[in-house]
Image: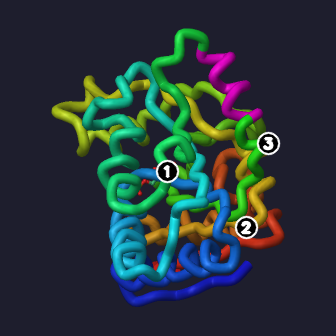
């Protein structure tokens, strides 16, 4: 595990952007596993700047996102497809057809999960970007009795619904289910880039990196991955 201790959110974003840029420079057709949430917003805007400055070319890049809410239309302001379009895809020269987010409104959710796993297997993820939930979730792999390996539909933890309510009018509007990439695909990514910022994440990051490996803290499985980079201001 490689750990970068940074001063603040901005330095985290800058450092992570440089890592992803270097990945794309060394392999222009890289497959990036991407995340949503507040943590990567700064990183995405740095990547957009690097692209505008001609330092990174996304034309051959493929992206595969971690998760999507169930029952939110892709155009909904709170869908993760919309988040990615607004915060990154519309600002870089990635081809729309090379961007992938689970289809949260698929009629057959089980079939959609299987399709997503086949997509991940056929592309292979070079580097998987992860944020960290307050309960230790990665993607929407919530604390559970065992690690769930395939892409699956999950009932969101009360704490996750509460945390994500900040983006909605009120807590009742937060979808209670989501499709998430499973722990299997995350662990198969060649490299993992975990970004964590803010005092409120200090304790869970400590448990993730130095506590027992347990599905009660899903991110703790990363201790068993052989190529993890952590960039954080609370380490
Ligand atoms: C989002 C995702 C989640 C977030 C986590 C942290 O695609 O997979 O695991 O990374 O909930 O969210 P923020 O960054 O909003 O604190």
Look at the image and say whether residue 100 sits in the magenta stretch: no
* Residue 172 horizontal/vertical position (percent): 26, 24
* Residue 134 horizontal/vertical position (percent): 47, 54
* Residue 80 horizontal/vertical position (percent): 40, 40
Q: Residue at x 70, y 59 (%)?
A: 220
The span shown in magenta is 109-118
Mark toward the viewer: 2 or 3: 3
Q: CA distance from mark 2 to mark 1?
A: 23 Å
Helix, strand or loop at mark 2: strand
Residue picked out by circle 1: 95
- Horizontal side of 182 relative to 94 (left or right) equals right
Q: CA distance from mark 1 to mark 3?
A: 20 Å
Residue picked out by circle 2: 191
**Above or below — where is 105 with respect to 63?**
above
Mark toward the viewer: 1 or 3: 1
Mark 2 or mark 1, which has the lower sequence index?
A: 1
The count of marks equals 3
Residue picked out by circle 3: 121
Mark 1 or mark 3, which has the lower sequence index?
A: 1
* Residue 1 horizontal/vertical position (percent): 74, 78
Q: CA distance from mark 2 to mark 3?
A: 15 Å
């Amino acid at each position: 595990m490689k750990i970068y201790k940074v001063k603040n959110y901005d330095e985290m974003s800058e450092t992570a952007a440089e890592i992803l840029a270097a990945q794309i420079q060394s392999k222009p057709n890289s497959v990036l596993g991407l995340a949503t949430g507040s943590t990567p917003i700064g990183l995405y805007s740095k990547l957009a700047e690097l692209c505008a400055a001609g330092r990174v070319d996304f034309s051959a890049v493929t992206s595969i996102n971690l998760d999507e809410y169930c029952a939110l239309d892709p155009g909904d302001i709170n869908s993760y497809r919309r988040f990615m379009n607004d915060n990154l895809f519309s600002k870089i020269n990635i081809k729309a057809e090379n961007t992938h987010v689970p289809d949260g409104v698929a009629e057959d959710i089980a079939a959609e999960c299987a399709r997503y796993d086949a997509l991940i297997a056929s592309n292979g993820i070079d580097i998987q970007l992860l944020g960290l939930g307050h309960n230790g979730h990665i993607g929407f792999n919530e604390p559970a009795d065992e690690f769930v390996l395939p892409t699956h539909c999950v009932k969101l933890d009360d704490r996750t619904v509460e945390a994500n309510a900040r983006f909605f009018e009120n807590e009742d509007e937060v979808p209670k289910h989501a499709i998430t990439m499973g722990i299997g695909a995350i662990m198969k990514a060649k490299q993992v880039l975990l970004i964590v910022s803010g005092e409120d994440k200090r304790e869970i990051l400590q448990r993730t990196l130095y506590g027992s490996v347990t599905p009660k803290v899903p991110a703790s499985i990363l201790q068993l991955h052989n190529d993890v980079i952590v960039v954080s201001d609370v380490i």
